[in-house]
Amino acid sequence: MDARRILSAVAALVTMLPGGCQGGEAAPAQRTVAPCSWSYFGDPRAVAHESRVITGCVATDGRTVLEHFDLDTGRRRLQTVFAPLEVDDHNNPSLVFFRERLFVFSAPHSGYLYPRDRRSQVRYRISTRPWGAGGGFGATRTVPLGRGCGLGYTYPNPVVAGDRLYLFMRGPCWEPYFTSTADGIHWTAPRTIVQAPPSSEQDGGGSRRVRPYAKYAAGPGDSVLMTFSDGHPGSFRSSLYFLRYADGRFTAADGREVGTLADLPLRFDELDPVQRYSRRAGRAWPMDVAAGADGAPVIAYTALHGVADTFRYARWDGARWRSHPIAPAGETLFSYHNQGVTFDHRDPSRIVLSRTVDGQNEIEARRTADGGATWQVTRLTRDSRAFNIRPMVPRGLPRGRDVVVYVAGRARSFREYDTRVVMAVDAG
């Protein structure tokens, strides 16, 4: 499919732009990035600089691949950046620009499932040219990390704040974990941010550790925004929490100091609660975090009641957290209770999500003008024969350009998938 056809055929996405048409329903044209997949908790999965969008995913043979796509010319380059690991959608790369270079991070899906005696590493490569132009990369490096409980590292999340690159992840004890660098080469000693609850609190007991989940994003004033659940909602009565980090201090949304680097690891009961578990509130799971136009944090998450999951939007109004439902998430896909909701980080009053429509998972764009109380809906896929899941808006897109990338296809598990990453592009 040539670039002119792509760019002219997807005008339906203009309804996502401020001041765009109301209630657009035409499905946009799509193009395949690569036969590959990704999980939901390693981010960013795609980044942009000027007209170029760079998307990373794990191929159906386990290779870590990148696609460079130029929105103006339609030119594309597909390359392998890491040799194959096992076929597992958790192994997708996470991308970030730091000091005008593209950094690509990758870690294997670690834990009890795979041999614990293998050496788990977070690998990364740095582009040789500014902004990843030309596709050249230096040698593969590894981030020096601790062994802890020996469960390895999963879900790298690089975030640039001020003059530092922070790398967050699930650490070797399955707890939120991070390190940072000022030059991309030398890293600070890794630290656990918050301790997981004791495993005895897990539903039905069991010997496995509780798995907190987290999302991270750059915030105003060289800060980092964080949102956590204290467990997986499928096996834990999970609550949702918020933290802001800046200048060595962790604070709540109201500015109250929760702790400093010297106090790590924190406890969940010290964090800023957004939604505490109750039968009425449900079990929370973080999907995304961002700063609104006024600098106040917003969180996209889900609330699980039995097998029914609902997307929700929480916003700090200056005095307290206010939460509104967005939409029912719909049917499950193997171990997941929902298929993802993500902010457009340029304007987090805009989101993209996957929900079940007429028995199939479809992608929608939504926009709110009243803090999440009501939503304008634009369907980006419809009448699909296979699922469309885990959408995101590439970080760093210029204003007036809209791109949504997501996974389409079929899967039996996170290790058995016949999928492709798809891009919908709008020239504005």
Image (tube, rainbow, N blue to C red):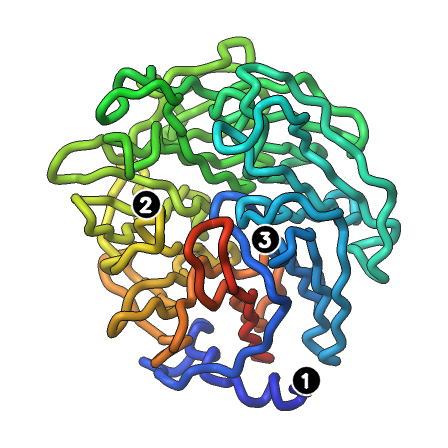
Kindly report the distance in space between the C-alpha atoms of the residues bearing marks 3 and 2: 24 Å
Whichever of callouts 1 and 3 sits on the residue coming sooner in the sequence is 1
- SS of the residue under disc 1: helix
- Could you say which quadrant of the image residue 329 lies in? bottom left
**Do tag 3 and tag 2 residues touch (Cβ < 8 Å)?**
no
Label 3: which secondary element: loop
* Residue located 44% across and 65% down the image: 410
Residue 45, disc: 3
Kindly identify which residue carries mark 1.
3
Residue 118: x %, y % from top left: 65, 26
Residue type marked 3: Arg
Q: Quadrant of residue 79?
A: bottom right
Above or below residue 381? Residue 324 is: above
Q: CA distance from mark 1 to mark 2?
A: 39 Å
Q: Quadrant of the C terminus?
A: bottom right
Residue 15 figure quarter? bottom left
Q: Residue at x 40, y 29 (%)?
A: 211
Q: Is residue 386 left or right of residue 85?
A: left
Under mark 2, the amino acid is Arg
Mark 1 Cα within 10 Å, few/some/many (few <14, many 20+)?
some
Residue at image x 59%, y 53%?
45
Q: At 36% across and 23% down in the image, what residue appears? A: 271
Sequence-wise first label, 1 or 2:
1
Q: Secondary structure at mark 2?
A: strand
Q: Counting residues from the N terminus, which is met first, the one under dot 3 or under dot 2? A: 3
Label annotation for residue 315: 2
Amino acid type assigned to the residue bearing label 1 in the image: Ala
Q: Is residue 154 above or below residue 271?
A: below
